[in-house]
Image: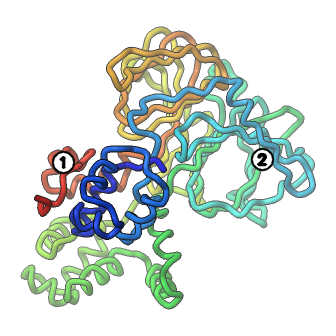
Amino acid sequence: MRVDNYKVMHWLNTRKMTTGQTADAVGLDHEQLEKLMSSEEWPDELAAAVARALQITPEQFAASGRSGLTVLVRTAQELHDTRRPIQRDGIHFYNYYTMAAPQGAVAPVILDILCPADRLPALNNGHLEPAITINLGPGDIHGRWGEEHTEATWQVIRSNAGADNWIVGDSYVEPSYCPHTYSLAGAAPARIVSYTGQSSLAGLMEDVNDWSDPAAHAMFGWLEEGPAPQQVATLLLDRRGHTLESAAALLGAGEADLLAALDEGGIELLRALGTTLGFDYRLLIRPATRHDAVGKTFKDIEECRRETRAFKGYQVTSTASAPHLPDLTGLFMLVSGHGANLSEPAESHYLVTAGSPTLHWTDADGREEHADLSADASAWVAPFVTHHWSGDGAVLKLGSGRHLGYLDLYELTNTYAAVSTLRRGRRDNRGWGYDS
């Protein structure tokens, strides 16, 4: 088993176990365990024994396989080799293809839309991960998001046949577990790219799967009431032994004043409440929303054209986005000449949609690398890796919340001494201070 020894040390610190105590628990000499912890390859039986001693599973200290990765490239032929035909509703419904990504990471997929225009496409069941979807053309497609036909559940997703077809087509963002499906809108073939980005709820869902039924249903009942600012405030106050009345009194205000601040977004009083009682007042501000009746946010070609702009030597315009899914991002990019350096806070996925642009990047050892790409080639770029495009062509850039995502930024803005905390935590191999 390939082991990340930094994760092993983290769990030793978390469990407050010294290396000596751990060695005793698994029947090793201390020196043998220390030698093992300097190796990346562990015998399976020893990995399992150490995991039992730490009351975790071996997967919790397995190496990710991504250490030091900067850029991964998949050629057009390599993408085509991932083709997977999908049968649905008695017909050949889709072909799936997978874009470049590290092992174990979420990757965008490309779909050939094969359901004919004269057939109502069968719905799927949706999935936890929210998604951003873009028509790659050349034809238009129908999107379906529900049993009944309404403006929100049956819509044409157009491709761009104009001179500015680097903006390849309409796009939309869909929420978790939104049933969806597609069919052709005419005789022309069509494809989409779909990026089911990492869900911010994934960790919570894993925990909830282990909860008792009464506990899970109690949380569901609380959520049915909101979570509006007043419900969230009551939850946070209950945990701290406060009522709305006692919390308001602590601030020298009345309960009616606090209720008004929760209803109307009274920032100063809410900030004072959070600062005094030790929680983030931003949780008490109503979020902005911008979606239709089934939760999706749509953006057409005309809106993209109006928003076209110059950015660091490229022509760009944004795909659909939504404030309730802030980690899902997309950008149409026209490459002409030599663009300036880019460096993103989260991983980026690129798909070449036209031309033969070249991707340049700085590798982990500081070397300058490049890859000459063609249409249907894709690339994955790690966070904060300096890269740029040159030549002539068009690319589509997609991103989600791995990493630095919305929740990471939320946490970092609250973290005391954030930079020193992260510097200490990265590849930390120091014990918790009780090993002699």
Percent of width and height locating residue 194: 64, 44
Q: Would you say 196 lies left or right of 27 here?
A: right
Image height of 139 relative to 26, above or below:
above
Q: State the SS at label 1.
A: helix
The residue lying at 43 percent from left, 58 percent from top is 47
Q: Which residue is denoted by mark 1 in the rendering?
A: 424
State the residue in front, 293 or 111.
Answer: 111
Q: How is the image coloured?
A: rainbow
Residue type at mark 2 is His
The residue lying at 31 percent from left, 75 percent from top is 263
Q: Which image quarter holds the C terminus? A: bottom left
Image height of 313 relative to 59, above or below:
above
Residue type at mark 1 is Arg
Percent of width and height locating residue 84: 78, 42
Q: Quadrant of residue 433?
A: bottom left
State the residue in front, 429 or 181.
Answer: 429
Q: State the SS at label 2.
A: strand
Q: Which residue is denoted by mark 2 in the rendering?
A: 142
Percent of width and height locating residue 417: 13, 51
